[in-house]
Image (cartoon, grey):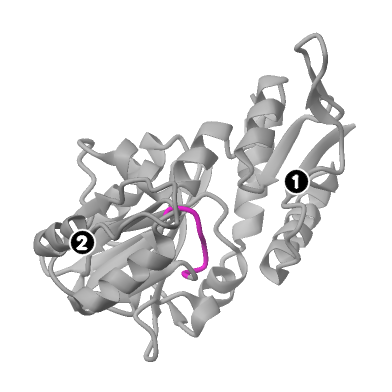
Amino acid sequence: MKKGAIISNAYSRLTPVENQIKKLKKEFALMGVEINEFKNGSFDLYIDGSGKIVNSLKNYDFCVYLDKDKYSSHLLEKSGLRLFNSHRAIEACDDKMLTFALLADRGIPVPATVPAPLCYSPYAEPAENFLKETANKLGYPVIIKQCYGSRGQSVYKAECFSELKSVYENLKTLPHLYQRCIKECLGTDIRVIVIGGKITAAMKRSSETDFRSNIDLGGKGEKFIPDEQIAELCLKTAKILNLDYCGVDVLPDKDGYLLCEVNSNAFFDGIESVTGINVARAYAEYIFNEIYAK
């Protein structure tokens, strides 16, 4: 019997995640693949006293890993389970600064980006010189992003030094970064789904009330046909990061396009409703062919 596992976060009850699981299970069932779903932490996965990895899921043919827990993904993969996406790919996308570091010098245009120096004490003196130099490099407004976060909820905009300093004070003990604001496209971006090195669907997202275009924050989507420049940018990014599946977010700039972010577990709902494309089916078919058709 063909069988696979789907793992999601132990604490998440997000509707888009539950919908991802339901849609994938339905598509795999049509292909004769039985899928069992698990919350991270609900199965045996640990290093025993002899240093061996104990993994109660190791006999599954594959695992669709819908979590960002890099420790579990590392142990699962090291014990022989094929993950979609791989541990390294998930890790690379989960940390936004790591994403940009891995893409640096690889021909991927991005907004100018400055990593925040790590701070281990909430009582540390404000890094005013660093903030002033950063603002001089990037100009106002400055975009600030926590390195770990999704759905646009950990992204901020500072219009002046006092706002920049205020955001910094709230984030200084958390990994974060600073980026040049692409003023031409505030509240607008392009989401492209790449599966197995091919573009599956794309939409343009825009918001009239927020500088962030995320649909969860009130943005609206419309079907979009990527041109050759966008397609090349997205496919090259996915290849460098070794992603089986991803959502690549692109910013239109006056001189072309810039990479905004890469999401290794991009949700299906919004882009499927806008484009009419069954992204879940395309992903399930890709996994089936990777596991059973070779």
Q: Which residues are magenta?
A: 147-152
Q: Residue at x 71, y 29 (%)?
A: 76
Q: Amino acid at mark 2?
A: Glu
Crowdedness near tag 1: few (<14), some (14–19) or many (≥20) residues, C-alpha within 10 Å: many
Q: Is residue 262 left or right of residue 253?
A: right
Residue 150: image location, x then y, percent? 52, 62
Considering the whole magenta stretch, tell me its main secondary structure: loop
Q: Residue at x 84, y 33 (%)?
A: 2
CA gap, disc 2 to disc 1? Answer: 43 Å
Residue 251: image location, x then y, percent? 28, 65
Residue in the foreground of this view, choosing between 286 and 205: 205
Residue position for label 2? 128
* Image quadrant where one finds the C terminus: top right
Q: Is residue 70 left or right of residue 24?
A: left
Location of residue 192 by image quarter: bottom left
Q: Which mark is residue 7?
A: 1
Residue 77: image location, x then y, percent? 66, 26
Residue in the foreground of this view, choosing between 276 and 60: 60
- Residue 277 vs 87, above or below: the answer is below
> Which mark lies nearer to you, 2 or 1?
2
* Residue 293 seen anywhere in this rendered image of the structure: no
Residue furthest right as drawn: 1
**For the residue labelled by badge 1, is the local secondary structure a helix, a strand or a loop?**
strand
- Residue 45 vs 4, above or below: the answer is above
